[in-house]
């Protein structure tokens, strides 16, 4: 098993960023790699609650993932299971991995540490790093031009 960790600084307070990563409205604004568009976002951010995201890449391919919230500790930590239910990384179909989002207040906003663990191989890790990297860059940009939240 392999994992990836990405770190981003976001110009908003942790509580604002937590809403952006845990509510359907927040997720819809940034989820998916660069060039993708959100089709559906559902979120019941409580331990045992479910989420589902569906997006379309610029090549027209649709991808859907879903899972369950395992830890919900606003505004500091969110942990969820992750399963591709349509499209996604072919090696990961039928498997469950784990996404962890940790938020820490820093000068000027929030440091977000994003970990996707239990990926099956290096190719999956590289694919997810590209996808999550683009998505997190969109999250950073969402708050970059806004007044400090």
Image (spheres, rainbow, N blue to C red):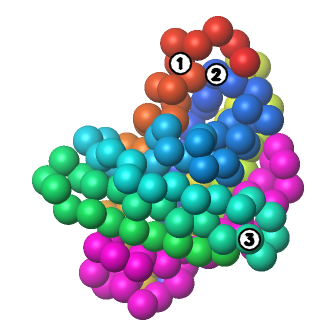
Name which quarter of the figure residue 45 lies in.
bottom right
Q: Nearer the viewer, mark 2 or mark 3?
A: 3
88 versus 149 height, above or below: below
> In this figure, which residue is indicated by the disc labeled 2?
11
Q: CA distance from mark 2 to mark 3?
A: 28 Å
Upstream in sequence: badge 1 or badge 3? 3
Q: Residue at x 71, y 62 (%)?
A: 44
In this picture, is 21 found above or below 125?
A: above
Q: Position of residue 5 (x, y in %)?
A: 54, 57
- The reply to whether residue 144 is visible in this rendering is yes
Residue 144: assigned label:
1
Contact (Cβ within 8 Å) of mark 2 with mark 3: no
Residue 105 drawn at (x, y percent): 79, 32
Write the start and end of the magenta stretch as one range: 69-98
Q: Nearest the camera: 57 or 128?
A: 57
Verify CB contact (< 8 Å) between mark 1 and mark 2.
Answer: yes
- Numbered circle sitting on residue 49: 3
- Sooner in the amino-acid sequence: mark 1 or mark 2: 2
- Tag 3's secondary structure? loop
């Amino acid at each position: 098993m392999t994992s990836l960790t990405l770190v981003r600084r976001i110009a908003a307070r942790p509580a604002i960023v937590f809403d952006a990563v845990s509510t359907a409205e927040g997720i819809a604004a940034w989820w998916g790699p660069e060039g993708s568009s959100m089709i559906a976002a559902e979120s019941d951010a409580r331990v045992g609650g479910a989420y589902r995201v569906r997006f379309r890449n610029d090549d027209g391919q649709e991808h859907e993932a879903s899972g369950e919230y395992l830890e919900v500790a606003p505004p500091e930590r969110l942990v969820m299971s992750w399963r591709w239910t349509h499209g996604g990384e072919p090696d990961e179909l039928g498997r469950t991995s784990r996404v962890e989002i940790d938020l820490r207040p820093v000068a000027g906003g929030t440091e977000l540490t994003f970990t996707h663990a239990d990926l099956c191989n290096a190719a999956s890790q590289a694919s997810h790093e590209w996808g999550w990297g683009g998505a997190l860059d969109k999250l950073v940009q969402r708050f970059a031009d806004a007044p400090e939240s």
